[in-house]
Image: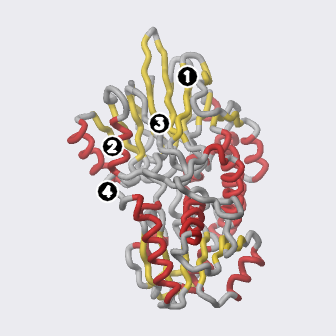
């Protein structure tokens, strides 16, 4: 059998791995490369494998960098089933529908072809088969697949693949993205069962986050500081998971009287739709206890919050001159409605920008995180005079300590660990750490590299 790496190996995005067995070919994830233009040439390049020869696809979770090229796969001739958990299908639909419109807008600006349209997206969704956690499926002869809760976002999974060939079996674990510890609205990551080979993400493989219990306290402190001087708090947040965690935290802080009931705006159509899915799939959530949903029985809605799904409603936020909080996408500040708010507020010394997620190289979020004094927004230059802080404890990714526990798993250590989904320096540091602490064989693959197993 062979394992090939077609994404998330020399950067943090574009997850795509192909496992070839005697019985067929299994593709694990099929994501877009992010960080620069969404319609960048990297996402328009051939996959590196023949889509017509793939027999089945399994998806770890709904994030765009794990699912964004699934319609391209169909365009290239794939006709088989695409397996994912029920919440993942719901999120994939709204994320990719939103992305279709963004890609069309970007294509006009950058002159590149549009990767796919809404019809191709809906055709792809026709091939999706939903699978509950721990329901073993056999997509083709000699291969069985099981989804485990990764605790990263709603419906997220790490996937166990067992391959039986010539009387022998080999077990693989594909991590997808592993969730942070003590996420306030999701179950903990399940224990990793035995595996011969583990593909592990390494987004935060070189550092540990702040303790989870500091999350809400730091948020309250920042809000009170900025609001106390009459400023606006901007929270660029990923629409899936990060936004819901922030809403939950604000709801709890308001109920305890730790922040004032100032105007708050959720200015992201995608985040609004995603939050509805979180409500719909509430049986997949696990709230901290004691946690009160408030008098309205909703963990994600409170009287001072206004949702602004339309462009007209978004523009009306400008009429509110009072101290306020604006939560808007996207989380890396490469596009979306947060850009309009940055243009309006980033040069105001009273403003606060709170970074609550990973910022990839080449993004405006990374520039601001690293202390840029000037940024370009929509072609205009703006001085960065706002106060910029970050809370790593809100990350949806596990840190080095959490990832180490995942690699260690239950029972015997894996024979080989492949590190993916991380900056090269981070993967090298994490590899050294794993070799030293666990004495395991660690490999850092290159793009299109194939391993004979």
Q: Do the CB atoms of the residues marked 1 and 2 lie less than 8 Å apart? A: no
**Distance of mark 1 from mark 3, alpha carbons?**
13 Å
Q: Closer to the N terminus: mark 2 or mark 3? A: 3
Front position in the image: 303 or 366: 303
Q: Secondary structure at mark 3?
A: strand
**What is the crowding at mark 2: few (fewer than 14 residues within 10 Å), some, or many (at least 20)?**
some
Q: Nearer the viewer, mark 4 or mark 1?
A: 4
Q: Closer to the N terminus: mark 1 or mark 3? A: 1
Can you see residue 135? yes
Provide the residue designation for mark 4.
Answer: 207
| Among the 4 quarters of the image, the one containing residue 447 | top left
Provide the residue designation for mark 2.
Answer: 404
Where's residue 403, x and y in %? Answer: 37, 45
Which numbered disc covers residue 144? Answer: 1
**Distance of mark 4 from mark 1, alpha carbons?**
35 Å
Q: Secondary structure at mark 2?
A: helix
Q: Nearer the viewer, mark 2 or mark 3?
A: 2
Q: Nearer the viewer, mark 1 or mark 2?
A: 2
Q: Do the CB atoms of the residues marked 4 and 3 lie less than 8 Å apart? A: no
Identify the image's colour scheme: rainbow, by chain, secondary structure or one colour.
secondary structure
Q: Residue at x 60, y 71 (%)?
A: 327
- Give the farthest residue toward the top: 167
Can you see residue 425? no
Which numbered disc covers residue 435? Answer: none
Provide the residue designation for mark 3.
Answer: 174
């Amino acid at each position: 059998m062979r394992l090939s790496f077609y994404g998330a190996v020399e950067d943090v995005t574009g997850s795509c791995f192909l496992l070839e067995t005697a019985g067929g070919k299994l593709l694990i994830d099929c994501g877009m490369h992010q960080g620069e233009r969404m319609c960048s040439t990297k996402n328009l390049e051939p996959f590196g494998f023949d889509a017509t020869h793939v027999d089945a696809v399994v998806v770890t979770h709904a994030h765009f960098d794990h699912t964004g090229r699934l319609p391209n796969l169909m365009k290239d001739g794939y006709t088989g089933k695409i397996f994912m958990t029920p919440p993942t299908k719901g999120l994939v639909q709204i994320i990719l529908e939103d992305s279709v419109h963004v890609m069309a807008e970007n294509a006009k600006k950058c002159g590149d072809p549009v990767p796919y349209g809404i019809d191709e997206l809906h055709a792809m969704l026709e091939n999706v088969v939903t699978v509950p956690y721990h329901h073993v499926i056999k997509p083709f002869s000699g291969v069985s697949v099981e989804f485990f809760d990764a605790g990263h976002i709603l419906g997220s999974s790490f996937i166990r693949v067992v391959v039986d060939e010539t009387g022998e079996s080999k077990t693989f674990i594909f991590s997808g993205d592993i969730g942070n510890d003590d996420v306030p609205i999701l179950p903990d990551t399940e224990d990793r069962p035995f595996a011969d080979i583990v593909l592990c993400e390494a987004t935060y493989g070189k550092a540990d986050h702040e303790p989870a219990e500091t999350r809400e306290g730091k948020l309250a402190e920042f809000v009170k500081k900025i609001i106390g001087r009459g400023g606006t708090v901007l929270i660029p947040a990923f629409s899936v998971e990060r936004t819901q965690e922030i809403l939950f935290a604000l709801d709890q802080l308001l109920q305890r009287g730790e922040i004032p009931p100032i105007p708050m705006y959720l200015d992201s159509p995608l985040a609004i739709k995603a939050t509805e899915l979180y409500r719909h799939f509430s049986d997949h959530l696990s709230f901290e206890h004691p946690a009160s949903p408030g008098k309205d029985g909703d963990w994600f809605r409170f009287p001072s919050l206004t949702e602004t799904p339309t462009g007209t409603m978004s523009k009306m936020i400008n009429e509110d001159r009072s101290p306020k909080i604006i939560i808007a996408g996207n989380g890396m500040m490469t596009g979306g409605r947060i850009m309009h708010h940055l243009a309006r507020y980033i040069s105001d010394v009273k403003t606060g920008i709170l970074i609550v997620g990973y910022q990839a190289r080449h993004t405006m979020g990374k520039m601001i995180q690293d202390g840029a004094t000037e940024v370009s927004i929509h072609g205009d230059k703006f001085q960065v005079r706002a106060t910029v802080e970050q809370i790593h404890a809100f990350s949806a990714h596990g840190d080095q300590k959490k990832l180490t526990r995942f690699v260690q798993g239950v029972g015997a250590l894996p024979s080989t660990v492949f590190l993916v989904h991380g900056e090269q320096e981070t993967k090298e540091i994490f590899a050294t750490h794993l070799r030293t602490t666990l004495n395991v064989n660690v490999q850092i693959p290159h793009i299109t590299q194939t391993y004979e197993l």
